Amino acid sequence: MIANVNVKSLLLVSLLAVAGCATATPEPVSNPVIMQVKTTVEKEKLVTNPACTDYLLTKSAQPGVDLVEVMEKHGGACPGDAQVQHRLFSVYVDQKTKQMASDKDDPEEGNLKLLSPAG
């Protein structure tokens, strides 16, 4: 188990180095990528409580692709420890076509499926 954790840590460090140490940052809901993902997530009912959901954007996580992490939000009217945010799933957005793919059905393995565009 410890060896597995070390392998995952090394993989994460390698991925961050390759990605130019891109980091996820909370973005205002007015960000067009966040708006697109949020609208689709809510329209398709991909989360149980939209008011207790946060979106973290990593611009250009891969060349030409933005990454939005859909996270649980805790504290205030949202149950849970405000210091903890669990990742629910990820959404990858093509910067040119705006096509989205998500691991919502398989967040553990990260197998992606296309999402219908909001609209």
Image (spheres, helix red, strand yellow):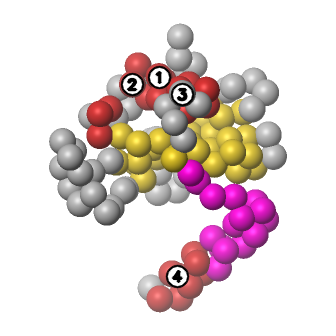
Does residue 24 show up magenta in the picture?
yes
Residue identifier under label 2: 42
Q: Nearer the viewer, mark 1 or mark 3?
A: 3
* Residues shaded magenta: 10-25
Residue identifier under label 1: 39
Crowd tier of the residue under label 3, counting other residues whose Cα lies within 10 Å: few below 14, some 14–19, many 20 or above: few
Crowd tier of the residue under label 1, counting other residues whose Cα lies within 10 Å: few below 14, some 14–19, many 20 or above: some
Q: Earlier in the sequence, mark 2 or mark 3?
A: 3
Q: Nearer the viewer, mark 2 or mark 4?
A: 2
Q: Up-down: is 114 above or below 14?
A: above
Q: Earlier in the sequence, mark 1 or mark 4?
A: 4
Mark number, residue 25: none
CA–CA distance in space, label 2 to label 4? 35 Å
The residue sitting at 36% across, 56% down in the picture is 85
CA–CA distance in space, label 2 to label 1? 5 Å
Marks 1/4 in contact by CB < 8 Å: the verdict is no
The residue sitting at 56% across, 51% down in the picture is 25
Question: What's under tag 4, amino acid-wise?
Answer: Asn
Does residue 97 show up magenta in the picture?
no
The residue sitting at 60% across, 35% down in the picture is 101
Residue identifier under label 4: 4
Q: Nearer the viewer, residue 34 or 49?
A: 34
Q: Secondary structure at mark 2?
A: helix
Marks 2/1 in contact by CB < 8 Å: the verdict is yes
Q: Earlier in the sequence, mark 2 or mark 4?
A: 4
CA–CA distance in space, label 1 to label 4? 37 Å
The residue sitting at 42% across, 53% down in the picture is 87
CA–CA distance in space, label 2 to label 3? 16 Å
Q: Nearer the viewer, residue 100 or 50?
A: 50
Residue identifier under label 3: 30
